[in-house]
Image (tube, helix red, strand yellow):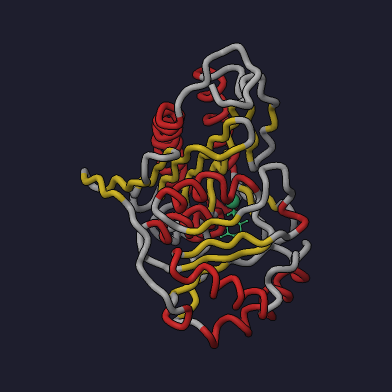
C-alpha cells in the first residue's frame, strides 16, 4: 500500500497493474482489429466512415469501434478490479474506492484508424493515489506492444521478441528529431502552427504521426528524440508517459485532473537535451497554454 493510501485493500504493485493493463490492451486490440476488418474492404473505408460521428469539432471523429473498445475495456476493469476508478476518452468516468485509477484511450489516433494509416493504439495507463505507475500501449496495426511499470523499465514485444527500451543519447537540439501534434479546433491549430515556425528551423526535423500515445513510445524506442503538444487529455498521455519515463526520458505532463481544453503543454525528450529543448520551446512561446 502506498504511503498516502487510506484504503483497506492491499494495493497491487505497479508490475501487477501493468500486467493487467497489458492483458486488457491485447484483448481490446484484437477487438479493434476484427471490428475494423468487418467495416472496411480492400478498396473502401466507407463502411467505417458511415459509423463515424464527431466530437469537439467537425474533424474530431469517433467511430463505433472507439465506443466498443472502451465498453470492452471498462467491462474488463470492472470485472478484475471492481473498486477502481476509470477515466475514458469516450465518457467512462468512475470514482475510485481503492486509490487505483485506470486512464483509457480505446483508440488513440482515431484519424489514422479511419484512413488506415498504421499508427493507432489502445492505451491504458494506471495511477495509484494520483501518481502514474504503469501503462500499456498496443499499436493495433503493427502488433507492437509497449509496456512499463514504475521502477521496472519499459519494454516492447513484437513478433515474439521482447526488447528493453532505452531513449537515444543526444546533447544537441539541432540534431533532434521532434514529434508534435495538433488539436481539433482551428484556433488552437493556428497557435500551434505559429509555435512550429520557431521550432522547425532549429531541429533536425519534425514528425506529426497522429497518435500521442505512440509518440511517447517512439521516444522510448529511440525513433524520435523529443515530443511536445498542447491540449492533450489524460488518456492521450497516461500510459505513454510511464513508458517514456521508464525508458529514461525526461517527461513533463499535466496532472490527471487537468482538462485538455485548457491547452497545457506536454514536453518529453531524451535527458541530454531536456534543458535546451525547454528553452527552445519557451522562446517559441510554447510554454504558455494554447486553449481550445
Ligand atoms: C489524438 C491523437 C493525436 C493528437 C491529438 C489527440 P485521438 O487523439 O493522439 O496525435 O495530436 O491531440 O487528440 O483523438 O486520436 O484519440
Ligand atoms: Ca487520444
Vertical placement of residue 87 versus 219, above or below = above
Vertical placement of residue 205 versus 69, above or below = below
Residue at figure coordinates x 46%, y 51% from the top left: 245
Residue at figure coordinates x 41%, y 53% from the top left: 41
Foreground pick, 53 / 289: 289
Residue extending farthest to the bottom is 201
Residue 46 visible here: no
The image position of residue 184, as x and y in percent, is: 69, 62
Residue extending farthest to the left is 160
Foreground pick, 13 / 65: 13
Which image quadrant is residue 58 in? bottom right
Q: Is residue 256 left or right of residue 221?
A: right
The image position of residue 249, as x and y in percent, is: 45, 58
Residue at figure coordinates x 70%, y 26% from the top left: 95
The image position of residue 250, as x and y in percent, is: 50, 59
Residue extending farthest to the front is 3
Residue at figure coordinates x 63%, y 46% from the top left: 234
Which image quadrant is residue 83 in? top right
Residue 236 visible here: yes
The image position of residue 275, as x and y in percent, is: 55, 70
Q: Quadrant of the C terminus?
A: bottom right
Amino acid at each position: 500500500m502506498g504511503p498516502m493510501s487510506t484504503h483497506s485493500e492491499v494495493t497491487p504493485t505497479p508490475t501487477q497493474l501493468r500486467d493487467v493493463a497489458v492483458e486488457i490492451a491485447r484483448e481490446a486490440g484484437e477487438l479493434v482489429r476484427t471490428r475494423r476488418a468487418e467495416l472496411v474492404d480492400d478498396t473502401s473505408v466507407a463502411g467505417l466512415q458511415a459509423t463515424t460521428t464527431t466530437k469537439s469539432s467537425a474533424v474530431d471523429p469517433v467511430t463505433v469501434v472507439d465506443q466498443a473498445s472502451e465498453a470492452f475495456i471498462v467491462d474488463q476493469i470492472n470485472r478484475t478490479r471492481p473498486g477502481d476508478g476509470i477515466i475514458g476518452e469516450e465518457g467512462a468516468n468512475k470514482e475510485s474506492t481503492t486509490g487505483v485509477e485506470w486512464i483509457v484511450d480505446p483508440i488513440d489516433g482515431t484519424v489514422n484508424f479511419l484512413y488506415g494509416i498504421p499508427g493507432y493504439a489502445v492505451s491504458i495507463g494506471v495511477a495509484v493515489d494520483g501518481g502514474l505507475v504503469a501503462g500499456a500501449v498496443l499499436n493495433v496495426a503493427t502488433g507492437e506492444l509497449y509496456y512499463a511499470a514504475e521502477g521496472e523499465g519499459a519494454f516492447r514485444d513484437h513478433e515474439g521478441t521482447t526488447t528493453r527500451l532505452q531513449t537515444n543519447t543526444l546533447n544537441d537540439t539541432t540534431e533532434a528529431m521532434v514529434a508534435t501534434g495538433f488539436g481539433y479546433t482551428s484556433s488552437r491549430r493556428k497557435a500551434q502552427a505559429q509555435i512550429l515556425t520557431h521550432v522547425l528551423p532549429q531541429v533536425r526535423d519534425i514528425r506529426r504521426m497522429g497518435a500521442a500515445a505512440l509518440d511517447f513510445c517512439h521516444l522510448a524506442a529511440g525513433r524520435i528524440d523529443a515530443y511536445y503538444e498542447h491540449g492533450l487529455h489524460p488518456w492521450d498521455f497516461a500510459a505513454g508517459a510511464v513508458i517514456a519515463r521508464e525508458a529514461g526520458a525526461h517527461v513533463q505532463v499535466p496532472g490527471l485532473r487537468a482538462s485538455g481544453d485548457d491547452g497545457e503543454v506536454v514536453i518529453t525528450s531524451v535527458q541530454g537535451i531536456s534543458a535546451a529543448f525547454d528553452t527552445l520551446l519557451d522562446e517559441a512561446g510554447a510554454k504558455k497554454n494554447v486553449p481550445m
